[in-house]
Image (cartoon, rainbow, N blue to C red):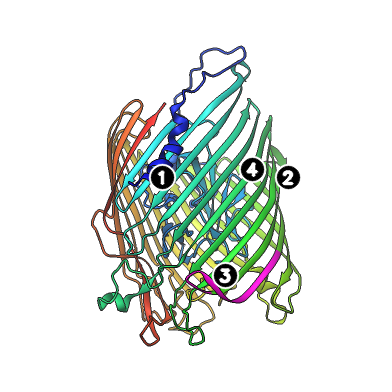
Amino acid sequence: MNSRHFSLLALVLTPALYAQQPPTTTNSKPEVLPEIVIEGKADDLLGKTDAASKGHASQADFLARPLLRRGEIVEAIPGMIATQHAGGGKANQYFLRGFNLDHGTDFAMSLEGMPLNMRTHAHGQGYTDLNPLIPELVESLDYAKGTYTAANGDLSTAGSADFLMWDLLPQNLVKTEFGQFNYYRALVAGTQRLPSDLERGVQQGLTYALEYNYYDGPWTQPEEYSRWNGLLRWFKTDDDSKLSVTFMGYRGSWTSTDQIPSALVNAGTLGRYDSLDPTAGGESERYSLNIAFEHRDDDVATRANLFGIYYLLDIYSNFTYQLNPGLPTGDQFQQAEQRWVLGGNVSRTWEKRELMGIESDLTFGLQTRSDLIGGIGLWQTQQRHRHAMIRQDDIMESSAGLYGEAVTRWAPWFRTVIGLRGDLYYFDPVKSTVAGLDAETAGIVSPKFSAIFGPWKKNELYLNFGTGFHSNDARGVTAGVNSADALVRTMGGEIGLRTQAIRDMTTTLALFWLQSDSELVYAGDSGTNKPGDGSERYGIEIANYWRPKTWFTADAELALTHARFMTAPAGANHIPNSIPIMFSGGFNLGAQGNAPGWFAGSRLRMFANSPLEATDTYRGRDSVQVNATAGRRWKNWEVALDCMNLLNRNDNDISYYYQSQAPGRPAANDTHVHAVEPRMFRMRVTYRF
């Protein structure tokens, strides 16, 4: 570790060197906190949810597994995989239910009501960067799949995830991590209690976190990924209400390790970790303020939040190298933007009301969002110097969504959920270097329906149906005669089963079907999405969570999917990068959660047989990765060793098939790959107080 990294780690850890002041209370007495047992995905959700594919993952579900990258938190969602095709601070590549979600298309993610997806993004519709998250500050995530949830709107066809954060951290902590390939991480986080009145149930505090992370990776051209994260969260709670104000900040810079032609790797011309453009890379920033409020008055619950986000991205990519004969400097291009995102959500639920004489819970909600995007553009570049502008725009995109939902209990063994959602969008090309753009408005109505039977002898059956949508990039929507559809309808159904009939085991089974009027297809030569043909998917998902002992837990998740374009001719209707087989499973031994003692665990993740182009002539290689961890936890200290890619397999994180031209070689169609990182070890030391 060089002196620069020592100084940065010292800066992060300095706050922990100062003793915390004892909590100040009014009329306080010693507080005895009850023991809380959180089992996450193994929870008994019978009678509490309306789909087999909905669930809740606790922090223990994703921190118990070694994480190579931050975005792998979402792999706590059954059937979801997060990989990377460029490394560094670029958003992950996500896969679920036969979708190549690219960097977030068709899967909506949020952080306590703040959107994480960026629509009309410089690098792809729905771009979702999870690097601004600090895993230790995430208490849990709620996830849903399909088009059956009224509260889910744009980009949620495959599903959604909402990350929830701690108000009061269970313990203050200082954590340091270090590993091979110049991996360093330092984190200090905690909660400072503020004057409270515990006898009246009132408490307030200030939760804080500061993190620094650096990583070069195994690449010939080091990633040089440097990341800062910070958080301040003030909260006040009582028996009926909670108010929080949260500020978050993130800044990252990196050198990209884009995919390379497999033919050159197989011939020995390129190494697996080489690059054809060592000047690709970028920087990104995100700063957000979220004000959230919850209140319960007997059987009426109100939830609301207001948010403001500032976001910046400046990224340089080169996927085709020197294919364009009119560009003797090469095919590198720059995509950049900065934006403000302003909006809010409010919902109100009336519980146990009578609807047609039947007990029902009624919910109404309103969601608004405006993206003020400045300087979103595309340029031809060489070594990060601009040579020509392709286009640049200033855009305002605004939306409002109104939804209602009724949960009706017709009998002790039967209930229904009926929802209706309406969305209205406005796309305004405020300023552009392209002529002939026109402002556009669009609206869509999305009905939802679920029927739940049971529980009977710890079994519950679900029938779900609903329609949804995804929006298209405003630059395509406002293009006049050749414009793309503003809002594309999607439709889905599901038959599901949840059972806890076997002692200590939770099992879910879902048979699903999804249809989209227009598939958003990733274009590797430009790093963006473009509207494609309509598509159809169906498949099966099975998940098992077994916790027979306090010192042993195991789980296994399998997803099988069939995905095709609907209007393409037979034999040329495969959806590129649609993964038909996914498996994830693992076990944990010894002390669970934060309990003291020895612990160990291992996890296997596999995906296979993805077509790389429509004829299915070229396919991606199977990818199998095993990660493992072992350590010891004391009252205040924890030491652990993580091993990534334990089997040291030479698999690929991602494969694409398209035409490119390496310098000094003719243009050719080829499979382009981004290699899985080799076996590596990381040590982490945590002090809790």
Label 4 vs label 1: CA separation? 24 Å
Amino acid type for the residue under numbered disc 2:
Met
Mark 3 surroundings: few (<14), some (14-19) or many (≥20) residues within 10 A? many
Whichever of callouts 3 and 2 sits on the residue coming sooner in the sequence is 2
Q: Nearer the viewer, mark 4 or mark 1?
A: 4
What predominant SS class does the magenta segment belong to?
strand
| Residue position for label 1 | 62
Q: Which residue is mark 3?
A: 516
User: Hey, what amino acid is under mark 1?
Assistant: Phe
The local secondary structure at tag 3 comes to strand
Provide the residue designation for mark 4. Answer: 290
**Residue extending farthest left:** 647
| Camera-side mark, 3 or 4 | 4
**Mark 4 and mark 1 residues within 8 Å of each other at the beta carbon:** no
* Amino acid under disc 4: Asn
Q: Quadrant of residue 430?
A: bottom right
Cα gap from disc 1 to disc 2, whole angstroms: 43 Å
Tell me if I can see residue 438 in this picture: yes
From the image, state whether disc 3 or disc 1 is nearer to you: 1
Q: Position of residue 16 (x, y in %)?
A: 45, 30
Query: Where 23 falls versus 93 (above or below)?
Result: above
Q: Which mark is residue 356?
A: 2
Instruction: Give the CA distance from mark 3 to mark 4.
Output: 33 Å
15 vs 685, nearest the viewer: 15
Q: Residues within 10 Å of mark 4 (few under 14, many from 20)?
A: many
